[in-house]
Image: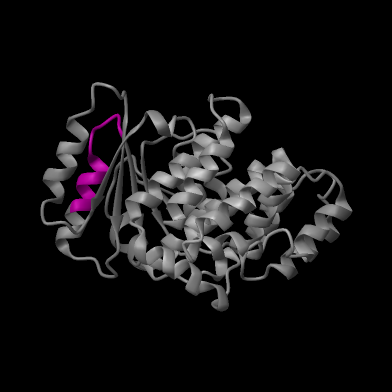
Amino acid sequence: MPSKQLKAIKFFSSSSLNSNKFIIFGDEYVLSYRTKKHCLKDLDINLLEKSYIDMTDDNFNESLDQCLMSNSLFNEKKVVFISLAKNRLNKELNERFAKIINYQTDNLLIIEISNLSKKIIERDIISKHDGDAVFIDCSPPYDSEIESYLKENLPDFLNKSENIKILLEMYEGNFSSLLNDLEILKILEIENEKAAMEVFTNNGDKNNFKLIEHMSKNESESALSIIDSMKKKDRNSVPLLIWILARDINAIKFIKDGKNLKPLGIWDNQISMYRKISDRTSKQSLEKSINKLDSIDKCFKGVLQGDPWNGIKSIVLELSS
């Protein structure tokens, strides 16, 4: 069966997943992030056993076999995250792609390609390997695709042709920022047109960088005082804090991967704060914080027991130390 290729903007709008092997490529980070989240949408990340493999490791084949053939007694499924950062494809890597695509397993495989060009992926991988993998293109979408996405996803009170035209012009070339701002509408529970358009034109709600400034300077008490203040003023500000911390953690990951922070709405004069935290924080620690954010969100929604504010404080302390 030929491998399937989808644009990410279509993939994470789909309700059903007909594969357990997802190969993600393209440089629109928010699309990549949401694609990975959508791959896990029917699973509880806290109950999944997780493994991480670099596709260029000398013992890659053995590591993959070991991961997929030895599930924990305590976890029904496992997710294996495979990364490839090389910008060239050789015979050995091509053979490894063939192994992944044809692997018979009930576990989940998520492969993220960061530097191979779309042309190489389509010509030398997708067209040459049959299997049940889904290749998800996270390249920046065309205006026509964004327009269709907005028509399908904007809330009714905002879903007008004149508003869509304004958004297309305002966010030209920065789809990641548009997605982030659409998420803020949900977080702030805005339900009228005027207030919604103010979110898009006013950066005040989004650019609260005082928290990251204190965390970068190891000023944990000052950082926690911001959390306490938000808790006192509005106990329902947990979703906004989750959004802020997710943005900050992703920015730190961007620094580690040498990526530009502008898609996250972070500019040059703020980068040094994220770099300080990146220098003292491991990727594994950042992944744990992202998983913890998911648990905090579930606590806030009542799906899990626990105080979401304690979870937020825990992450702030970790990033401050």
Q: Is residue 79 left or right of residue 198?
A: left
Give percent across and percent down for residue 319: 45, 55
> Residue lying furthest bottom in this view?
269
Give above or below for 229 relative to 207.
above
Nearest the viewer among 42 and 44 is 44
- Residue at the spot x=46%, y=40% of the render? 292
Give percent across and percent down for residue 246: 53, 51
- Residue at the spot x=19%, y=52% of the render? 96
Find residue 70 and report its image quarter: top left
- Residue at the spot x=69%, y=67% of the render? 171
Residue 127 visible at all: no
Q: What is the basis of the colouring in this image?
A: one colour
Q: How many marks?
A: 0
Give percent across and percent down for residue 68: 21, 35
Nearest the viewer among 7 and 186 is 186
Find residue 172 and report its image quarter: bottom right
- Residue range of the region highlighted in magenta in the rendering: 96-107
- Residue at the spot x=15%, y=37% of the render? 66
Give percent across and percent down for residue 160: 84, 53
282 falls in the magenta region? no
> Residue lying furthest front in this view?
221
Give above or below for 38 relative to 177.
above
Nearest the viewer among 19 and 107 is 107
Q: Which image quarter is the N terminus in? A: top left
Q: Which image quarter is the C terminus in? A: bottom left
Residue 281 visible at all: yes
Nearest the viewer among 148 and 286 is 286
